[in-house]
Amino acid sequence: MFDRFSADFTPTAREPRRVEEAASPAILSKLFDSYGGTSFNNGIYRIHTPGSSKAASKAAAEAYPALRMPLVCFGFDWLGRQFALDLDRGTREDPEVVLLEPGTGEALEVPVSFSEFHDVALFRYRDSCLFPDWFADWLASGGAAPAFTECVGYKRPLFLGGEDETPNLELTDLDVYWSRMGQLLIATRDLPDGSPVPHLKLSN
């Protein structure tokens, strides 16, 4: 299930193991047991622990209420985008994957099942899943590789007119970034194009 992935992705950091509740659904147990808390290739891709998965899933559900389904995040990339099980697609035993982009407000279907994600999607769709060239540009520009609790997020999100360019990126705390983007998404999602953005007092 992870043969090609383990041969190509190199662990560069791992969070200390903690005694945590079992992963749910059970399909994630092998992933979390083998790689939970691991950062690969300087943080371009990270795999959740059961605890961080629970926190990320809660933040994703709050930011994307229109999806109206249980969201179970299992991994995330250097930009803070979450990969989650899409329990409305595929089968209950092997659901498909959705990519949640807090900086754009989009939820994108990844056209593979979870069992194929690490050995197929991360190779066939690597450019769109991980933006490796942009990550290399970020590092070459002097940007730091994100720690497990960090991401390289947009200073100004794209859905508020931010530029999809390296100068609009900054290293930030992952949970704070998702909280801030989630509040902005909820406040602006139903505004007509061109409407002024209301002044918001954001909480962390």
Image (cartoon, rainbow, N blue to C red):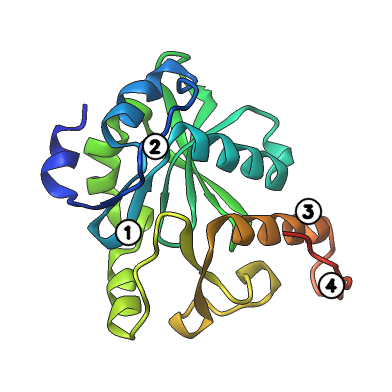
**Badge 4 amino acid:** Val
| Marks 2/4: CA–CA distance | 34 Å
Judged from the image, the secondary structure of the residue bearing numbered disc 4 is: loop
**Badge 2 amino acid:** Pro
Viewer-nearest of labels 1 and 3?
1
Q: Could you say which is closer to the camera, residue 61 or residue 14?
A: 14
Viewer-nearest of labels 2 and 4?
4
Circles 1, 2 touching at the beta carbon (< 8 Å):
no
The residue that mark 2 highlights is 111
Is 134 situated left or right of 119 in this image?
A: right
- In the rendered view, tell whether residue 160 sits above or below residue 168: above
Q: Quadrant of residue 162?
A: bottom right
Judged from the image, the secondary structure of the residue bearing numbered disc 2 is: strand
The residue that mark 1 highlights is 44
Q: Which quadrant of the figure contains the C terminus?
A: bottom right
Is 185 situated left or right of 166 in this image?
A: right
| Marks 4/3: CA–CA distance | 12 Å
The residue that mark 3 highlights is 186
Q: Residue at x 57, y 43 (%)?
A: 56
**Badge 3 amino acid:** Ile
| Marks 1/2: CA–CA distance | 21 Å
The residue that mark 4 highlights is 197
